[in-house]
Amino acid sequence: MRKPIMAGNWKMNKTITEALDLVRQLSMELKDIKDVDILVCPAFTALHSVSQAVEGSNIKMGAQNLFWEEKGAFTGEVSALMLKDTHCEYVILGHSERRSIFKETNDQVNKKIKAALKADLLPILCVGERLQEREDDKTYDVIADQVKGSLADISADELKNIIIAYEPVWAIGTGKVASPEQAQEVHAFIRKLISDNFGVETAQGLRIQYGGSVKPDNIKDLINQPDIDGALVGGASLKAEDFIQLVQACSIED
Ligand code: 13P
């Protein structure tokens, strides 16, 4: 059984005060949940404060990006070691917003994944097709290309520390969620791809999150799919009430 992981990607939102307010509500309301991994991913500026606020709780923290070099003259960048220093455990890499706005390539995402693993951070690798690619029947080609390219030279052993998030670009922030069947189809495809390249056992253990307009009213149908192991949530993770409901929906103990 794969433990579901519910992650909030706060993107470029929340001051330190706002972040602390949100995370305090979450840790109070979700303190009894044990069968779901709960993760918040604040902006860099709030990491240190949030990590202190969640210390000793069941809420884990991740960052939204890193740069692959360890240190040096890279103005504006943040290294894996710096993230570790703030007590991050996870890092989101290759998000579609980074791929489209900041032109990140699979090759760069691959370097970032390696840097994260080296520093003992658990990468969440994001993949997903754009609307035009789906309409052109290229979804599987795009996903295969992103998965293989981003995971180049990664071993099966290393893959045990990686999570994949399938986030169709057309569903992000649009209110247009993929149907549970559409998402399941791509998740199953990703698992098969991992199975073919890294072995069945690794593929069975891999957690694959869905992301894109996940809300309290659609989470149940998504999480009930056999290959959907949680969600990476944007908008709905910014409201305590919504994120609490999302986590609770993934808990069978609840
Ligand atoms: P929304 O939940 O706002 O659609 O964002 C999804 C996302 O990009 C999570 O990484």
Image (spheres, helix red, strand yellow):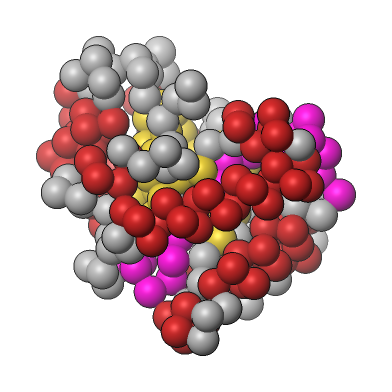
Residue 140 placement (x, y as % from top left): 59, 68
Q: Is residue 72 left or right of residue 182?
A: right
| For residue 219, above or below residue 76 | above
Residue at the limit of the structure toward the right, as seen here: 153
Magenta run includes residue 105: no
Along the line of sight, which residue is nearer the eye, 15 or 95? 95
**Within the image, what quadrant is residue 65 found in?**
bottom right
Question: Of 49 and 103, which appears nearest the observer?
Answer: 103
Q: Is residue 172 magenta?
A: yes
**Residue visible at 34% across and 15% down in the picture:** 34
Residue drawn at x 30%, y 60% is 179
> Where is residue 212, by image quadrant?
bottom left
Stretch in magenta: 153-173
On the image, the x and y values in percent for residue 104 come to 65, 71
Question: Residue 10 appears at what percent x and percent y?
Answer: 36, 52
Q: Quadrant of the C terminus?
A: top left
Q: Is 66 displayed left or right of 152 in the figure?
A: left
Q: Is residue 251 above or below residue 138?
A: above
Q: Is residue 19 visible?
A: yes
Q: Residue at x 57, y 41 (%)?
A: 163
Q: Residue at x 67, y 58 (%)?
A: 147
Q: Is residue 19 above or below residue 84?
A: below
